[in-house]
Amino acid sequence: MGNDTELRRTGLFPRHQALGAQLAPFAGWEMPLWYRSGAIREHLAVIQAAGLFDTSHMDVFFVEGRGSLDFLNYAFTRDLSRIRPGRAIYGAFLGSNGHTVDDAILYPRLEDRFAVVVNAGMAPVVMAHLRELPGSGQVSLREPEPRYGKLDLQGPAAASILRKILPGAEQLFADLPYFAFRGDFILPGSRIRLEDGTPAILSRTGYTGELGFEIFLSPDRLGAVWDRLLELGKPDGLIPCGLAARDSLRVGALLPLSHQDIGDWPYVNHPWLFALPLRGDGTFSFRKDFCGAAALRPEENPHTLAFAGFDQRRVDPHEAKVLLEGTEIGSILSIVTEMGIGRIGADIVGLASPNRPEGWTPRGLACGFVKVNRPLPAGSRPLLRDARREIEVEIVGSIRPNRTAARRLS
């Protein structure tokens, strides 16, 4: 990465230092991995109460002009033909070879005006890819100036905390389903205003699997809103959270990390097939054409599968192999310890599970994603082996049960 002077810092960097954050390079930014509370407590806070993340390193760009909808409908994996302003949609941009350029969330502001949120440092890469596609000359691609500040308020107490700084929250929440947003990405004109008049965009999205919001702000208002949320949210258990908890939470929620769990191989045979425009008739065929579609042939490509272990033990993902009946079949993409779950008998039970015994506390399970050369049905038990140990894991369709992300705000 080079020396620290090359790293970018968000407007909250002094606050991260004051809160005792362990800082590290991430995608060209110097970001908090965890705070004094530690990654385990931060992970559990988001499942049981709430956590506040600085996500101002994420990139945003605009696609605008007549034909933007048709252009993006070819460029993006999701079918945008029925998307309406106020509803966000997750999917991916693929190369002609079907490999992932980046995953993204699209925010239609108007019929021919879209905000696109991609991963840190990826706006120039994705925009360069889009400029090579048919129809790019008919649309405008630009990054906003100045950048947005962004906070992620995540956890079952997030709505209660947000009510304290958002006038008219009850009326707003009555019509804010999961993956909906309110406010204008041209911030001065946004109808969403916090208690001090700060204009914002409020999105019911996040990267934790728990109920929460992403809040887009002007960079000069970032610090004040961060301070106010931590102050008002403290009685509800709100604490600042870093990238380590974000990573373990997203794996437990079965969410991929771009360029790690999806990347330089065809975007197929994975747990995120909802991001492809499948016809739903039992065949692997698409409702629309899109960039990379012809390369997505299930029978010719590896399989990405979720797994959960039987205890906390992990292996080194960089050297470990996946074995089945003594034969090497693949490698590990992600492996974390999900501290909000455990096993009761063969079943995975979480802190929010209704069948959790009274007084039961999970010890945590290793979990993650593997890439293997064959399909494995749920319940299969491959081995993960590195130079130190060998652990048995189970292929699963879900990891942390009873997640709250889509819960009704009322």
Image (cartoon, helix red, strand yellow):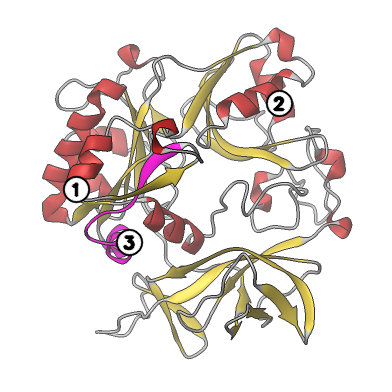
**Image spot of residue 156 (x, y percent):** 29, 55
Q: Toward which corner of the image does residue 379 lie, by quadrant?
A: bottom right
Range of the magenta residues? 29-48
Sequence order check, earlier mark of 3 and 2: 3
Q: Nearer the viewer, mark 1 or mark 2?
A: 1
SS for callout 1: loop
SS for callout 3: helix
Residue at label 1? 19
* Residue lying farthest to the bottom in this orientation: 345
Per the model, the C-alpha gap separating discs 1 and 3 is: 14 Å
- Residue at image position (42%, 80%) is 342
Per the model, the C-alpha gap separating discs 1 and 2 is: 39 Å
Is residue 168 something that shows in the picture?
no
Is residue 105 something that shows in the picture?
yes
Sequence order check, earlier mark of 1 and 3: 1
**Image spot of residue 310 (x, y percent):** 51, 84
**Image spot of residue 249 (x, y percent):** 42, 59
Q: Residue 129, labelled with which disc?
A: 2
Sequence order check, earlier mark of 1 and 2: 1
- Looking at the image, residue 22 sits to the left or right of residue 261; the answer is left
68 part of magenta stretch? no
- Residue at image position (72%, 75%) is 377
Q: Amino acid at mark 2?
A: His
